[in-house]
Structures are given as C-alpha cells and as structure tokens.
Image (spheres, rainbow, N blue to C red):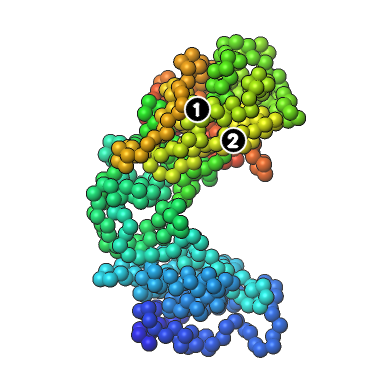
C-alpha cells in the first residue's frame, strides 16, 4: 500500500484524503465500513421498500465518496445503480484525468440529493495543479435489492461531464487562442459568457493556424469529435495565437445583456453588406449555442421569404389590394388571423405589416408548386445550403410539404425550422438584395468555401420587400412599431409568433435591420414577437 487515506468526521462533515493512485483501496474500504455493502442489511432480510431514510442517504453518499476519493472504482461502482458504467468512469477519473490526490467534502443533504465539493490535485509528468469544483449526487433505492444506491450519472464526477465525454489530462490537442473582435478587443468567456462555447470551437478549429504553442491541460474529451472538447484546468499555459473574429465587442455586450432578461432566449446580429456576424448571445449561456444550432418554427418572420416568393411570381404587389379575411382553409386546415381580425381593401404591404396570415394562404393555389417555398428559401436566401461560418451551425430547413402542411409553412409553422442566425441572414438578404453567407472567421484563414445562393433578389422585389419591412417598423399599424421606435436610421422589421404543441404561450420571434446591421431574436414561450423578442433586437441594433 503506497500512500494511505484518512477519513475525518468533524461536526458531521467528513473529508477523504486519498494519496497516490496505487494504494490498496479494498483494505481501506473494510476499515471504513467493516465490509458492509448496504446500510442496515442483514442476511435473510427482505429488500427494503419505501422512501429512503436520512441515515440511508447520508451513509450511502459518504461511503460512495470515500471509495471514489480512495481511488477504488470497483467498490465505488457497487454503490451505484449502474456499476458497469460507473466503474469505468471513476477509473478514468483517476487514470485518464491524472488525479493524484482528492479531498471530497459533502454538504447538507436536501432530501435524497447530497451536494459536495472536490479539492483535487492533478499531476501530469513534472507538473501538478490544484483543482476545485462542486457537484452533487442523488441516492435512490435499488429496484431489485432495495439497497440505497447512488443514482449514476456522469455529472457526479464533474458537473460538465456527459455520457459521451471522458476526462483527460495531457498535452492539449490545440494551442490556446486569444480571440479578438474586429477592432482588436479581446473576447473572453468571463466577460461575454455566451461566447464560451464559440471560443471553445474556434480554438479547436484554429488554434494550430494562428502560431500558438500547446500547454498541459485537463479537459472533457467529447465522443466522436462532433462537439468541441471542454477545457477544465490549465496545468501549464501554452502560448496563445491571436485569432481575429468578426464580432463587435459593443454589439456583443448589448446582446449579452438583452437575452439575460429571459430564461431561454437567443439573438444574432449580422452585417448585411458582408455577412460578418457582429454578435451571438444565448440565455442560458450553458454550452449549447442555440442561436446558431437551434431548430425552431420561426412563425411570421418566415413571411419575408413567402412575400419574396409571391412578389417574384407576380402574384402580389406591395401597393395593390390583397384579400385578408379572418380565416382561410387549405386542404382541410383552417388558418386564422390573430384574434380573427380581417382587413378590407388593404394592400399586400399593409397585410404584411399587420401580419395577416390569410393574405398569404389565399395565394398558395396560384403558386401551383408545393416545393416553391423551399426553392425560394434555398435559391435566394441560402437556407439549407452548407454554411461554413467558422463554427457549427444549423443552416435552416424548409422541407417539401403538401396540403395543409404546405399552408403552415407559408406562415412559418409546421416543418419549417430556423434559428436566429438563419433569420438574421434572411433579413440581411432582404436588406442587401443578395445572400452573403454569415461568418465569424475570415475564409482566408483556412481556405474554406462560402455557400453561394443561385440568384439575387430581383431589384423590384428587393425594393418592395424592404419597403414592406420599413412600413412594419414605422407605420402606426405596423406590428413592429413599438420595439423599433427607439432604433435610429433606415429601419425595417418583421414580427412573429410560433404556436408550439404543448406550450400554452407561443414562442416570440423578431427580426429587423437598421442601416447596415440586421438582427433576429427568439424567446421561448413569450408570446407575440413585439413583446419579448422585439426589445432584444432593438437593444442590439441600438448598440451599433
């Protein structure tokens, strides 16, 4: 037995100090528990049932944490409800992560949950570093044995660990990067939390391309390479290379602040004349970049694409009357306007500004092609093409649909899937007249080809589309007037709300342009676009 382990109980709180990785944990276990494998178990006893007692929760948690800290994965695993998975994970914690010493201190249980803190020492070759963090475990009763057991999940070992991830310590795969905005201002996850997952991906892709040198780190290695590895601890710093992005620090700061007002919200800002992404923010900033990778129905913001289709086919003109009844039926599906409103002798431009659903549905038969909307989205707005922004992105989808499902697509419902990146790009295309693929890092850095749309918007269509969006943002009857009142410059907008099955309140969408900046926002279960997503977009546009 190399270095031993000590268990100290002070005021009801214990800590386990485990030495090097080769000590005899089985003997340690017997010393702590007397070889007992369950709380209060005796030969011949029937399996216990019912709620766990406080003693069962406390003792089980203590015994599991003791075995883990002592470097005994087999013994720790037997105290969980998934010993096979838990055993390999606890072993990887010691061996793969290089943990040479650990002190684990449980807090006060809350029901069956037990919070705890870990203070560990990580060692790799000639370098060591202290590592501290907090996590928690849950105790459950075994289904067949009735024993109290730790409910196994990867977050027990570390709150950021997933089933697809593994803890590793060694020479970093890529060099660190010092990401800067378009003006040279440094971008950090501490100052701009939403950029955390973005910076991780940028480092992974470009760390070796900007003349940095690698260091020694502890990280979560993702399975399959589909997700960026997550750095957790730097044992020895590498030399960062400087990576210039298209982000504007001022716009990014405004975006971060704007989305914090909501539990689930995302926003993206793009420069229409170039496609450069000026800001990307999410709430919560928890690692999933919903602004780039989310897939949601965009509601009436999709009418920008639908209007472009109808204008291109000559079926409507912005200044000509278009029918807007309170409801319309298409292949058995009834589409209604909000609160059943209707417009008499209104132009198509006014129907767009007031978000009249039926004015669009009434034209589907005249289009005569169920795939026309998807073609318009792809060929003109670049939706569904393979975008190479510099990080992972979902690039929108308007799949083929027929009958009532096709009608739903015309107003951004049904099978249409978008995110704020897609909608900001659609708005940028409407403003500029041509699709310019959004990007965060210049294509020249890695010679990646940008996606290109097949054709531009005809100039007359682009003009009418911009004018209708301007009316929506400035005319007294426009649905976007309220949020856009504070926005300066040449401005236009479109509101949207998406009815989602199982949600009492619709998702809120808003997209707009102001001079050479376009932005789109999504707020989950927040109602009309002007009430929630609209103020988010306005705050971002005002920062430029």
Above or below for 340 versus 96:
above
Query: What is the C-alpha distance between the residues marked 1 and 2?
Result: 14 Å
Residue closest to the eye, 475 or 367:
367
Q: Nearer the viewer, residue 303 or 437?
A: 437
Give the image location of residue 127, x and y in percent: 27, 69
> At x 29% / y 53%, what residue is drawn?
176
Question: Residue at 69% of width from left, 80% of height from top?
Answer: 47
Mark 1 element type: helix
Image: 444 above or below 347: below
The picture places residue 29, in percent across and down from the top left corner, at 48, 84
The vertical placement of 501 against 140, above or below, is: above
Q: Which residue is mark 2?
A: 399
Q: Nearer the viewer, residue 402 or 69?
A: 402
What residue does disc 1 label? Answer: 379
Residue 68 appears in the figure: yes
The spot of residue 121 in percent (x, y) is 34, 71
Residue drawn at 23 percent across, 49 percent down: 211
On residue 279, which mark appears?
none
Image position, residue 532 (x, y; %): 54, 35
């Amino acid at each position: 037995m190399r270095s031993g382990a000590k268990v100290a109980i002070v005021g009801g709180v214990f800590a386990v100090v485990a030495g090097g990785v080769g000590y005899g944990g089985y003997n340690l276990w017997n010393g702590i528990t007397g070889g007992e494998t369950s709380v209060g178990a005796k030969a011949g006893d029937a399996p216990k049932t019912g709620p766990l007692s406080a003693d069962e929760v406390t003792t089980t948690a203590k015994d599991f944490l003791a075995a883990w800290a002592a470097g005994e994965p087999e013994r720790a695993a037997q105290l969980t409800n998934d010993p096979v998975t838990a055993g390999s994970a606890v072993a990887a914690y010691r061996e793969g992560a290089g943990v040479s010493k650990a002190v684990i201190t449980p807090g006060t249980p809350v029901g069956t949950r037990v919070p705890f803190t870990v203070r560990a020492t990580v060692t790799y070759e000639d370098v060591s570093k202290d590592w501290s963090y907090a996590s928690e475990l849950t105790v459950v009763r075994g289904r067949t044995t009735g024993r109290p057991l730790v409910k196994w999940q990867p977050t027990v070992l570390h709150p950021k660990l997933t089933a697809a991830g593994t803890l590793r310590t060694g020479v970093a795969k890529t060099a660190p990067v010092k990401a800067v905005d378009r003006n040279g201002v440094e971008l950090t996850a501490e100052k701009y939390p939403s950029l955390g997952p973005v910076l991780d991906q940028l480092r992974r892709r470009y760390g070796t391309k900007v003349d940095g040198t690698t260091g020694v780190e502890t990280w979560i290695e993702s399975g399959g390479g589909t997700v960026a590895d997550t750095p957790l601890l730097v044992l020895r710093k590498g030399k960062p290379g400087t990576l210039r992005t298209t982000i504007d620090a001022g716009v990014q700061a405004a975006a971060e602040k704007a989305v914090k007002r909501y539990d689930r919200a995302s926003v993206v800002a793009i420069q229409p004349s170039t496609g450069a992404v000026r800001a990307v923010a999410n709430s919560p900033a928890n690692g999933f970049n919903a602004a780039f990778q989310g897939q949601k129905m965009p509601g009436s913001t999709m009418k920008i694409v639908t209007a472009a289709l109808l204008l291109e086919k000559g079926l409507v003109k912005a200044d000509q009357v278009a029918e807007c009844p309170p409801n319309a039926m298409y292949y058995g599906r009834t589409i209604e306007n909000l609160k059943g409103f209707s417009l008499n002798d209104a132009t198509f431009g006014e129907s767009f500004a007031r978000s009249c659903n039926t004015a669009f549905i009434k034209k589907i038969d005249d289009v005569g092609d169920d795939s026309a909307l998807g073609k318009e989205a792809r060929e003109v707005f670049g939706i569904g093409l393979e975008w190479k922004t510099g990080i992972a992105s979902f690039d929108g989808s308007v799949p083929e649909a027929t009958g009532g499902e096709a009608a739903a697509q015309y107003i951004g419902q049904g099978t249409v899937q978008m995110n704020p990146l897609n909608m900001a790009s659609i708005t940028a295309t409407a403003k500029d007249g041509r699709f310019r693929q959004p990007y965060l890092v210049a294509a020249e850095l890695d010679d990646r080809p940008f996606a290109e749309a097949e054709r531009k918007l005809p100039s007359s269509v682009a003009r009418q589309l911009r004018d209708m969006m301007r009316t929506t943002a400035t005319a007294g009857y426009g649905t976007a007037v309220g949020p856009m009142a504070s926005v300066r410059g040449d401005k236009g907008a479109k509101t949207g709300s998406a009815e989602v099955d199982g949600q009492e309140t619709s998702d809120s969408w808003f997209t707009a342009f102001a001079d050479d900046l376009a932005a789109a926002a999504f707020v989950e279960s927040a109602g009309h676009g002007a009430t929630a997503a609209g103020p988010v977009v306005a705050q971002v546009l005002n920062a430029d």
